[in-house]
C-alpha cells in the first residue's frame, strides 16, 4: 500500500488543513516565470489569451498549463473577463486559475494591445513619457506553470480569478514578504537572480493559495470547505494518507466517530460529492502521478491505489481520465 507524506494518527485528532493541502499542492509542480514588468499611462489596455493558447505561445510542455498572474506594484487598473470586472490597486494581485482570456486596462483605451506582441519584442506604445504620476500603473506580469490538474482537488476548488492583497494580515501566509524578496532580487539583477526569482514565484503562488484558503469564507460546497470541517477534513486526511486501504463509508465513519449515514450526509454537504466518489478521484490522481514519475508496473500501481486487478483499475482510470493507464503514461513520455 502506498504511504504519503501526510501523517495523521488514527484518533479523533484533526489534521490541520495545511497538512491536507501539502500533497495536492506538490502534485501541481508549480513553476514560475516572469513575462514583463512595465509601466503604463492611462488610458491603456492589454489582452491575454486563454491559458491553453498562452501555454502554446510560450512553447511549454503539453502537460503544463500557463496560469497568468498580475501584480500591481503601484497605481491601479482593472482585470476584465467575460463575467467579472475587478479593480486592482497597489499591492494587489490577480491569478487567473480559470484559464480564461482576459483584459487588463485603465481608462477607455481604443483597443487592447495583445500581450503576444509585447512578448515578441513589440514596443510598449502605452509607456508613459513623463514623470510617474497618479494615472500611471506599474505591473509585474507572469505565469505560474501547473501540471496534471485534471483531478487535483485543490486546483479544481480555486476560483476563476483569485484576487488577493499582499498587505492583508493573516496567520498562514506571508505574501508581502515573498513579494518584497522577489522585487529586490529583480532589482538586484545579480548572479543567480533568475533562479532565485523562479523559486520565489513558486512560493508566491503557494502563499496566494494559502491566503485564499485562510481568508475566504466558504459558503457553498467545495473542497476548501471540506478540509476546514473537523470531521470531513479528518476523513480526507485518512484517504490521502492511505489511498490503497479497503475504505468504505462505514470504515471512514468509524475513524471520525460518527454513524455512516450522518458522516455521508456531512461529507456530501461540505464537498458536494460522496466520500467514495472523492476517494476514487483521489486514487486516480495518485495513479496519474505514479504513471508519470515511476516505472512501476500497472498491477503494482493498481494495488497501491486500492484495486485488486488491473482490469478494474484500467476501467476506472479511463472513465475519469479519458485514456487508458498505458496511453496516459505514453502521453507523458514515460
Image (tube, rainbow, N blue to C red):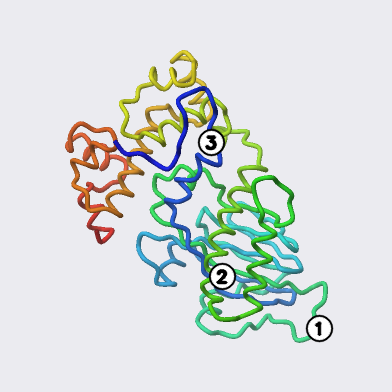
Residue corresponding to mark 3 = 222
Name the side, left or right, on which 301 lies relative to 201. left
Earlier in the chain: of badge 2 and badge 3, it is 2
Q: Distance between the Cα atoms at labels 1 and 2?
A: 28 Å
Distance Cα–Cα, label 2 vs label 3? 32 Å
Quarter in which the C terminus is drawn: bottom left
Which comes sooner in the sequence, label 1 or label 3?
1
Q: Please tell me whether mark 2 or mark 3 is closer to you in this view.
A: 2
Q: Quadrant of the N terminus?
A: top left
Q: Which residue is mark 2?
A: 197
Q: Tell me what residue is drawn at x 40 percent, y 68 percent.
A: 60
Q: Is residue 69 above or below residue 276?
A: below
Label 1 environment density (alpha carbons within 10 Å; few <14, some 14–19, many ≥20): few
Q: Quadrant of residue 320?
A: top left
Residue at position x 32%, y 29% from top? Answer: 245
Task: Single out the mark in the foreground, 1 or 2.
Answer: 2
- Compared across the picture, whether 271 is left or right of 328 comes to right
Viewer-side residue, 107 vs 263: 263
The image quarter containing residue 251 is top left
> Mark 1 and mark 3: span between their CA atoms?
47 Å
Mark 2 residue element: helix
> In the image, is residue 213 above or below residue 181?
above
Amino acid at each position: 500500500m502506498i504511504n504519503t507524506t501526510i501523517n495523521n494518527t488514527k484518533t479523533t485528532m484533526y489534521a490541520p488543513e495545511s497538512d491536507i493541502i501539502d500533497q495536492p499542492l506538490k502534485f501541481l509542480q508549480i513553476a514560475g516565470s516572469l513575462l514583463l514588468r512595465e509601466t503604463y499611462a492611462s488610458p491603456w489596455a492589454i489582452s491575454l489569451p486563454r491559458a491553453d493558447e498562452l501555454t502554446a505561445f510560450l512553447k511549454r510542455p503539453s502537460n503544463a498549463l500557463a496560469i497568468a498572474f498580475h501584480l500591481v506594484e503601484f497605481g491601479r487598473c482593472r482585470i476584465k473577463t467575460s463575467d467579472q470586472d475587478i479593480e486592482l490597486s497597489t499591492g494587489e494581485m490577480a491569478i487567473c486559475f480559470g484559464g480564461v482570456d482576459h483584459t487588463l486596462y485603465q481608462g477607455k483605451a481604443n483597443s487592447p494591445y495583445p500581450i503576444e506582441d509585447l512578448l515578441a519584442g513589440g514596443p510598449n506604445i502605452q509607456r508613459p513619457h513623463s514623470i510617474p504620476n497618479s494615472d500611471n500603473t506599474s505591473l509585474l506580469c507572469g505565469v505560474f506553470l501547473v501540471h496534471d490538474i485534471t483531478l487535483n482537488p485543490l486546483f479544481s476548488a480555486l476560483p476563476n480569478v483569485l484576487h488577493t492583497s499582499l498587505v492583508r494580515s493573516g496567520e498562514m501566509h506571508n505574501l508581502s514578504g515573498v513579494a518584497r524578496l522577489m522585487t529586490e532580487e529583480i532589482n538586484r539583477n545579480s548572479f543567480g537572480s533568475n533562479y532565485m526569482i523562479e523559486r520565489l514565484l513558486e512560493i508566491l503562488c503557494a502563499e496566494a493559495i494559502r491566503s485564499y484558503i485562510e481568508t475566504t469564507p466558504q459558503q457553498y460546497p467545495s473542497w476548501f470547505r471540506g478540509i476546514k470541517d473537523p470531521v470531513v477534513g479528518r476523513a480526507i486526511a485518512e484517504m490521502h494518507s492511505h489511498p490503497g486501504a479497503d475504505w468504505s463509508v462505514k470504515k471512514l465513519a468509524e475513524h471520525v466517530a460518527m454513524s455512516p449515514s450522518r458522516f455521508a450526509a456531512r461529507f456530501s454537504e461540505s464537498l458536494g460529492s460522496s466520500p467514495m466518489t472523492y476517494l476514487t478521484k483521489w486514487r486516480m490522481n495518485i495513479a496519474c502521478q505514479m504513471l508519470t514519475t515511476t516505472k512501476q508496473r500497472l498491477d503494482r500501481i493498481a494495488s497501491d491505489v486500492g484495486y485488486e486487478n488491473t482490469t478494474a483499475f484500467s476501467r476506472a482510470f479511463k472513465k475519469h481520465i479519458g485514456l487508458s493507464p498505458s496511453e496516459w503514461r505514453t502521453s507523458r513520455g514515460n
